[in-house]
Amino acid sequence: MSEIPRFLTYKGIPVWRHAQIIQWAAQIISAFLVVFLVAWFFINIGNAIADRNIPFGFSFLDREYQTPIGEHFIPYESSDSFRYALVVAASNTLLVAIIGVVLATILGIFMGVARLSGNWLVSKLALIYVEFFRNVPLLVQLLFWFFIILVLPPVREGYVFGGQLYINNAGISAPGPIPGSLGAVLTWVVLVAAAAAVGVMAHRKLTRRETETGKPSYPLLTGIAIVFVVGVLSWIVVSVISEAPFTISSPEPQGRFGRIHGGITVRAGLLVLLVGLVIYTSAFIAEIVRAGIQSVRRGQIEAARALGLSGTDTLRHVTFPQALRLIIPPLISQCLNLTKNSSLGGAVGYTDMTNVAITMTQTAPAVSIFILIMLVYLAMSLTWSLIGNLYNRYVGFTGV
Amino acid sequence: MMANVRPMLRPPRFEAGVLGWAHANLFNSWHNSVLSVVVGAVLLLALWFGLRWAILTADWSVIATVGGRFVIGSYNSDQACAGNNCFWRPQVSLLMVTMLLGMGWGMAGGGVTKRIAIIVGVVIALFAFLPYSFERMGMDVRLLLLANVPAIGAGWALARYTRFGTVKWIVIFSVAAFLLTIILLRGIAGIPGLQPVAVQHWGGLTLNLILAVAGITLSLPIGIALALGRRSHLPVVKTLCVVFIEVFRGVPLITLLFMSQHLVPLALPQTFPRDSLLSAAVVITMFSAAYMAENIRGGLQALHPGQEEAARALGLSGWQTTLRISLPQVIRSVIPAIVGQFIGLFKDTSLVYIIGMVDITEIGRTFILGNPEFRISTKEVFIFIALAFWVFTYGMSYVSRKIEGHLGVGQR
């Protein structure tokens, strides 16, 4: 009697209905399909490069870019390399993203709270604001602001307010601080930062004392006073020893065309992009804030009021901390959207990363440049996600 | 006895009627009163100047000058369609859409669908009476616009009195109408009256709507598949979905569109037909699907695990559990997010200018840049475009709220 092999007498689940086998087959097939597709793409790209003599690769990065970048906030010359030009462009995008996120959050919280106001007029106005700006494409809004700036008078005939504020089609100029010598600035900033650290510690300690003993200890006032006193004293000391850390410079028109020198000038492109991004994003943030505050149960507010907390204290210590857990994750995804939406800067004359990249494609391989800037955008996005995840872990909020 | 009944007192003056409402909503405390007065004053000033500008200063004739180009772009121009007799094709597509709306009304028998169908029909019919000269807007164009009213009626009757008045048939008709629209707009070589029109001549609101409809229909199923893939315990499938979602969500849409124009022609064989409309539709769909996947995943995570366990305990297979138990509940709970994404997708169709397509926004921009004498009325142009977008996006969010109310979201 010969032994029959085990697999021939197998009476279990048939192979084609065996869950594990099906799952493994699915994985192998999908992996194979993806590898096949990607390989096919790469073979085609290789053929195209060989046949049509299309430039490829990243050797262009060391070449001189030789094109001016309209607006830059770190030093840049046309003789700098492509690599450095891309860094400059990325810094432009980053600047818009940071300023935009701060302003949009402030305006959004304001509008979200206004939406919940007991005042009928205020809440309806906020509703109209949200429903209009949220539902119109950002590009249309940007172009609208852009053409409004364009019809402003040119620099020489622009509006001047009190000889300090200049508004014209090149942008807005206002008085602003100009840093003195590096040593003076550094000394003063370090001293103020140290004072701020001490102030925060004092604030914490006094708050604890206040909650434990009930004696009024003025924690916020003390903290601000420490920073203020140290700031003023060190300013005087630094000024006496070397020079003032910052001087206020006023904008002044110079030369035949009246170009404005001195002060701080926000140029039209940046201004339009910021106005558009901030208004558009704040409408979304307002809705997030409203939903977050409304999600706090009425019982919480009633309990706080029953314990004798005032309206402001209820908002500060009960409603807002709970609402924040629901507000922050979608808020961060709005920050991410704002960062990505700044890529529309090119449409309104601001040299953001995408705009510079599109200009670069005239003298360098387009695909390589776009792979690079997409990686930078991806890095920015993942940074935002990381902040979001860290926050979620910090408040111990897992789930939706 | 009667003498004991006291005369009924009038309600306090500040508690009822207009004064009561104002007292409760505008002047219920001193700081609210101050706020109301200040905001009211600013609002009145803004209204005064805004209306004065809109009625006296603004020159709306620029809208009339651009006219039909806002809707179909250069579709009927000399370069696109020799003989300028292609205008009827988008109009016939519109007739199919209104007929479908009529069918929706006939099937639902009233409510929101009825309201939408009637509003759309009346507005379109009113367009037939625009005070253009007959050279500018021919009788044929006007008649085809008026035909939308009987089209709604025909759709209504079709749904009411034949067996086509079911969701299944309406879906089939919708898909057929979309494919027919594409074929009609493209044209077929060799058939008189249907000469081919290249896609780069498609434009205006029609282009936005075609891209949006294609993107909306396809991004939902792809998004659901991606969300399920991301939740899958198969490592290969999960990794692929995560990478796809994060990459498409992490970069701006215009860089993706730009890449589709430069990389895709390299990655496909040269013999492959190039089609900017198709690649725009694919990129917008993929981009939106990645966001959709995250919305759906949020809903999947919020679903109580007991639902799936109960379904499995009842003997449903994995697919049955997903399709019949999980997804219906998930989709219902994330309708606001899904519609928000649809609205986002519709707004994103304005970005196709980056690959040289001329949507309604780009028509406004190129018109202003090409006609410096209208530079002064740019505000009017962009306010008009903004309102055109707003009508559709607000309509979508209105329908979404109605569906939510109908499905009783948050009530059970």
Image (tube, coloured by chain):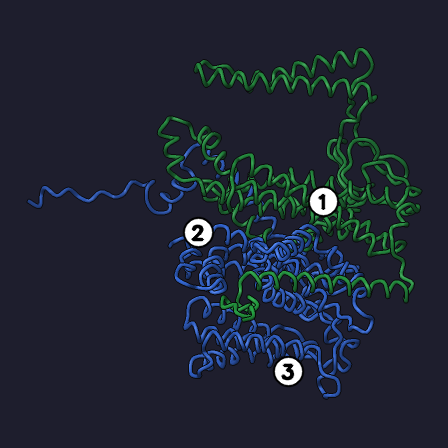
Chain colours: A green, B blue
Q: Secondary structure at mark 1?
A: helix
Q: Are marks 2 and 1 on the same chain?
A: no
Under mark 1, the amino acid is: Ala
Q: Disc 2 or 3, which lies upstream in sequence? A: 3
Q: Which residue is mark 3?
A: B140
Residue A350 placement (x, y as % from top left): 78, 47
The residue at which mark 1 appears reads as A379
- Seen from the viewer's position, the closer of residues B188 and A396 is A396
Residue at x-position 82% and y-position 36%: A74
Nearer to us of marks 2 and 1 is: 2
In x, y percent, where is residue A352? 77, 46
| Residue type beneath disc 3 | Asp
Q: Picture quarter containing residue B25?
A: top left
The quadrant of the image that shows the N terminus of chain A is bottom right
In the image, A302 versus B48, the foreground residue is: A302
- Mark pair 1, 3: CA separation: 56 Å
Query: Which residue corresponds to the image point at 73% horizontal and 14% vertical from the top-left?
Result: A234
Of the pair A378 and A25, the residue shown nearer to us: A25
Q: Residue furthest front?
A: A1
What is the crowding at mark 1: few (fewer than 14 residues within 10 Å), some, or many (at least 20)? Answer: some
Mark 2, Cα crowd under 10 Å, few <14 / some 14-19 / many 20+, is few
Q: Are marks 1 and 3 on the same chain?
A: no
Look at label 2 and name its amino acid: His
Specify whether B293 is left or right of B362: left
Is label 2 in a helix, a strand or a loop? loop
Front position among marks 1 and 3: 1
